[in-house]
Amino acid sequence: MFRRFVVVAVSTLAVCAAADNPPVKVVEEIAAKVNGDIITRGELEKKRADAEAEARRQGLTGVRLQEAVKDYAANTLRDEIDQLLLVQKGKDLNINVDAEVARRLAEIQVQNKLPDPDKFQSFIREQTGMTFEDFKDRMRRDILTQRVIGQEVMRSIVIPEPELMKYYEEHKKDFVREEQVFLSQILISTEGKNEAQVAAAEKKAKDLVARAKKGEKFSDLARDNSDDTETAKNGGYIGAMKRGLMDKAIEDVVFKGKKGDITDPIKRPQGLLILKVEERFEPGQASFEEVKNEVQDRLVQPRAEPKVREFLSRLREDAFLQIKEGYVDSGAVPGKDTRWQDMAQLKPQTTTKEEVAARRKKHILWIIPAGTVKNTKVKNQKTETPAAAPAAEPAKTPEPAKTPDTAKPAEPAKTGGDAAKQ
C-alpha cells in the first residue's frame, strides 16, 4: 500500500525576476508559518516528486499511480505541519533522542558492513540523495516525533492482558523467532599505526577485556575508550544480529556464547574488536512474555490514529499558524483563523535561497544520526554510525523509523518569520 513516508531532501527552487530590479534572484516561496518555523513551496513540491518516485518503485502505474500521488499531495501540507508541531512539542518536553539515533545508525552501518566512517557516509549519500548530516537530522526528527506520540498519546491506551494473550494465541505463527544475538562493541583502532603503536593497542584491548570481566560496566568502557565514535555515544550498543550478517569466525563465537559473555579481542582489518553478548535468543516459538510488547504495539496502532489526530488538532489550536492563499491544510481545526496576515506587506511571501539554507543550518548544528531495529532500510532516503563491526553480506539500504500516518516525518525545521523578497 502506498504510504506517505518519503525522502526528505533539499527543496526545489523557484526563480523569480522583477523587471525593475535586476539581477534575477533565486527564491523560495513560503507556504506556511508554524510558530517560529516555515514550510516552503519547494519542500512541498519535492515531497510530491518523492512520493511519485516511491509509488513507481512499488510498481504503481497508470490510474493507480495518479490516484496515489493525488492522495498524497492532498495531505502534504497537513503532514508537514503535523511534524513541525510534534518536533516543537518534543523540544518543549526536553526529549533527547541522541542515543537512539546513534544506535540506529550503528545498526545500519553494521548490517551493511561499512566500518569506515567515510565510506559509510558516502553510502548514505548514494542511497538517500541526502548529506549524512541531513540524514541524521531527519532520523532524529522521526524518532523525536515517535517519542512525543508515545509519551502524549500511546501511553494512555491500555490493552487488557487477556486481549493481548488472545491475539498472541491466534497469531502464534507470526512470532516464530530466528536465532539472534544482541551485541555491544568496543573498537580499538590500529589503522595507520606502526608496530609499537599496534602493540600498545593490543595491550589496551586486553586490559579493557579484563576490566569488563571483573565487573566494570561495558557501556562505560565503550563510551570512554572505543574508537568507533558513533557506537561509543550509545555505550557501544549495536543491536540484533542474525546468522549470515557477520563473518563466520565471529558468528561462531557470539552464537555459542550466552548472555553477558565478553569476547577476547578479535583482530579485524581496522583494529581490535571486543564484543559483549547483551542477549541471545534460540530459534523457535517465542513465548508470550518475550513478545508481549510487540503484541501490544500491534493492537494499539489502529486505536491510536484517531487519538493522534485529536492531539495534533489541540497543538494546532494553540499554535501561531498562517497559511498562504492557494495552499490547503487538510488537518485544519474548524474555527481557527489561519489566514495569511498583512498581505500587502508580505507579498510576494518569498525569501532567498540563502536565508532558507541558513535557517535550516541552525536546526542541524547539534547533529547526531529508518524500523528492527525493525527495519534499517532507507526508501530513497522509515524511521528507521560508523562501527567496526563484523563483516557480512551485500549492502542493505537504511530506513528511518516510521510514524503513524497522521504524523509523518518531515524535512528539518526551517525557522523564519515574515518573508521578504531579496
Image (cartoon, rainbow, N blue to C red):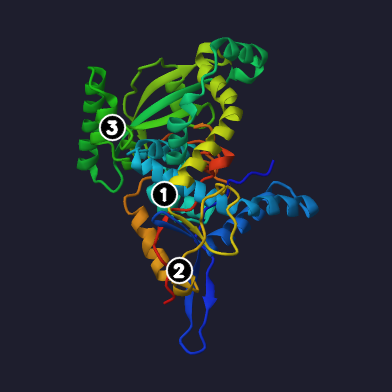
Measure the C-alpha gap from mark 1 to mark 3.
24 Å
> What residue is rendered at 35% in x and 31% in y?
185
What residue would you read off at disc 1? Answer: 137
**Which numbered marker is on residue 342?**
2
The mark closer to the camera, 3 or 2, is 2
On screen, residue 240 versus residue 190, left or right, reads right
Classify mark 3: residues with Cα within 10 Å, few (<14), some (14-19) or many (20+). Answer: many
Name the residue type under label 2: Asp
Q: Cβ–Cβ below 8 Å for labels 1 and 3?
A: no
Q: Is residue 363 left or right of residue 10?
A: left
Distance of label 1 from label 2 (alpha carbons): 33 Å
Mark seen at residue 115: none
Identified at 69% across, 40% down, the residue is 1
Image coordinates for residue 96, horizontal then vertical, percent: 34, 38
Of mark 1 and mark 3, the one earlier in the sequence is 1
| 323 versus 220 height, above or below | below
Q: Residue at x 79, y 54 (%)?
A: 62
Amino acid at dot 3 = Ala
